[in-house]
């Protein structure tokens, strides 16, 4: 039996089947504590929480050892059917970062932006951009900001912003995202293959209705649109990557533009991270300019 440990503690049992479990940070502050952590001001911020500044202990993550460290986890929110825009910043909370070895190493997480047409199914999700973040060891209830180079978000995108850590955190790091119970207009999500959650899963549906992730994003960054390219060939999956862009797909380069004339004629990416977040990469991603969005 896999146990779900969170705000309800050891008495919360759910019929998921493996050794891993969704757990609170075993060394966290009491569930009564709340720290107000004002973040940097961001214009045109897109949030789904009623309270996007306060952080409280009690978020959950897939753990192999009852809340000492974590396995692979993706903590996420989704904004469906956006108009054409761009991504400049993500502001997010962190409840805990802990180097379990006591060496002071940071938690190297990825702040990911996906186009997820099949949401909440993870299959078919396209990774639009990643910002790598080193969260200092000992972090407790703090707000961070990740910067993006005005990444183009095409019309109609189901945008998913995810705080991702790999399975290499197992027995190495304890990382829990920042959350509170202040209310939300849309659900908070988690995915973790080791805990049997291969797709993004509404936390309320697995008995954590009061874990409201603090994740916001902004399109303010002083730029225009972004260059879009239509792929001319199928890219090649390498080293275990299961899903790679195909001929005819539209992909954003991340280059800003005011007009399509500002975009390079061709796009060539020698190595692209696997869009489904798995191992490996996509090789030889080639396209010709299609639009400035």
Image (cartoon, grey):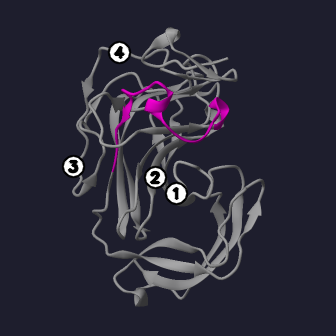
Mark whose residue sits in front, 4 or 3: 4
Q: Earlier in the sequence, mark 4 or mark 2?
A: 4
Labels 1 and 4: the sequence-earlier one: 4
Q: Which residue is mark 1?
A: 116
Determine the secondary structure under disc 2. strand
Labels 3 and 2: the sequence-earlier one? 3
Q: Is residue 102 magenta?
A: no
The residue indicated by pointer 4 is 31
Secondary structure of the residue carrying numbered label 4: loop
- Disc 2 and disc 1: Cα gap in Å? 7 Å
Q: Nearer the viewer, residue 148 or 22?
A: 22
The magenta region covers 193-216
Callouts 4 and 2 close, C-beta under 8 Å: no
Q: Residue at x 52, y 60 (%)?
A: 117
**Contact, CB < 8 Å: mark 2 with mark 1?**
yes
Seen at 45% across and 83% down, the residue is: 291
User: Crowding at label 2, few (<14), some or many (≥20) Cα neighbours within 10 Å?
Assistant: many
Q: Secondary structure at mark 3?
A: loop
Q: Which residue is mark 3?
A: 41
Q: Nearer the viewer, mark 3 or mark 2?
A: 2
Distance (Cα) linking label 1 and label 4: 33 Å
- Mark 4 and mark 3: Cα distance apart in space: 28 Å
Q: Nearer the viewer, mark 1 or mark 3?
A: 1
């Amino acid at each position: 039996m896999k146990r779900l440990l969170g705000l309800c503690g050891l008495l919360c049992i759910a019929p998921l089947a493996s050794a891993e479990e969704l757990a609170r940070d075993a060394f966290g502050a009491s569930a009564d504590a709340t720290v107000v952590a004002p973040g940097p001001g961001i214009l045109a911020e897109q949030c789904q929480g009623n309270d996007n500044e306060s952080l409280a202990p009690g978020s959950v993550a897939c753990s192999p050892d009852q809340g000492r460290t974590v396995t692979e986890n993706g903590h996420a929110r989704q904004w469906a059917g956006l108009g054409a825009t761009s991504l400049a910043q993500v502001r997010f909370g962190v409840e805990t970062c802990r180097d379990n070895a006591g060496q002071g190493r940071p938690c190297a997480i990825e702040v990911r932006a996906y186009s997820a047409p099949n949401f909440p199914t993870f299959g078919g999700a396209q990774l639009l951009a990643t910002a790598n973040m080193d969260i200092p060891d000992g972090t407790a209830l703090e707000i961070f900001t990740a910067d993006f180079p005005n990444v183009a978000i095409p019309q109609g995108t189901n945008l998913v912003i995810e705080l991702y850590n790999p399975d290499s955190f197992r027995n190495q790091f304890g990382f829990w995202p920042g959350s509170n119970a202040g209310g939300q207009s849309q659900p908070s999500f988690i995915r973790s293959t080791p805990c049997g959650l291969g797709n993004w899963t509404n936390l309320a549906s697995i008995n954590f209705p009061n874990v409201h992730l603090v994740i916001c994003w902004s399109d303010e960054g002083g730029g225009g649109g972004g260059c879009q390219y239509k792929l001319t060939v199928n890219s090649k999956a390498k080293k275990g990557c299961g899903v790679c862009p195909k001929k005819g797909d539209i992909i954003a380069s991340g280059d800003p533009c005011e007009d399509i004339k500002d975009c390079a004629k061709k796009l060539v990416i020698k190595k692209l991270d696997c869009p489904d977040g798995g191992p490996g990469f996509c090789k030889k991603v080639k396209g010709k300019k299609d639009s400035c969005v």
